[in-house]
Amino acid sequence: MEAKLVNEGGLPKFELNGKVVSPLIYALSDTPVGQSDRPWSKKAISDFHNAGIDLVGIVCDLQEDWHDDGSYYPASIIKEIKGVLAVNPSAKILIRLNVTPTYPWMRKHPEELIKYYGVECTDTGLGACVKSKDGTREIKASFFSEKWKKDVGDLFAVMKKGFVKEGVLD
C-alpha cells in the first residue's frame, strides 16, 4: 500500500494506492476505553465502514511495548491493528504514535534530556509516558537528540519486522 498527501487544485488530498480517498476518518481515542477491542469501538468501526469510511486512526504508545531491559516488540500496536481489521478487513489504518521514551531510557541518557535554565526537573517515575505532564517539571527527552532519533529509528525497524511477521503490513 502506498499512502501520501497530494496537492490537487491547491488543496491537500489524501491518496491511497493512487486513488484520492475521502478525508473522513474514524479515530479511536487515546484512552483505554477507545481501544479497538471494546464493543463500542467495534460498533463504531463497523458503522463507519457501512457509511463508506474505511480510514481508521489508532493511537499507540511506543513505550508500552518497550521493556526496561531495552527489548521491543510492537505487540500492543499489532493488537490494535488486528482489532480494527477483525471488524473491517478493508480498513486502511493510520497510526498516531506517541514516541516519548521510557523513564529507563531517559535515566540512561540524562545528557539527552531537555534542560531549562534555572529550573531543576524531577524524575518521579510515575509512568512510562510523560505526555500528560506537559507544563510540569517532569524530566522530558529532547526530540532533537541525535541519540533518541537513532534509537527510535531502530525501534521503527523492529516494529516494521513485527508488522510483516504478524501479517498486518502488506
Image (cartoon, helix red, strand yellow):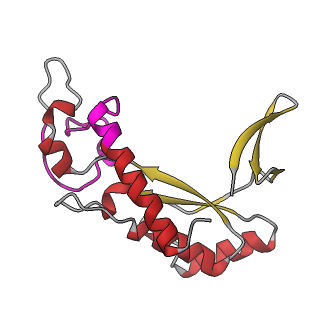
Q: Residue at x 18, y 55 (%)?
A: 126
151 up-or-down from 169: above or below: above
Give the magenta-colored segment's residue range: 122-150
Q: Residue at x 30, y 44 (%)?
A: 151
86 up-or-down from 163: above or below: below
Q: Residue at x 27, y 36 (%)?
A: 147
- x, y percentage for residue 79? 46, 74
> Residue 114 lies in what quarter of the image?
top left
Left or right: where does residue 123 sit relative to residue 157? Answer: left
Left or right: where does residue 161 sit relative to residue 130? Answer: right
Residue 76: say if magenta.
Answer: no
- Total number of numbered labels? 0
- x, y percentage for residue 143? 34, 34
Task: Give the quarter of the figure containing the N terminus.
Answer: bottom right
Residue 144: say if magenta.
Answer: yes
- Evaluate whether residue 30 shows in this view: no
- Evaluate whether residue 60 shows in this view: yes
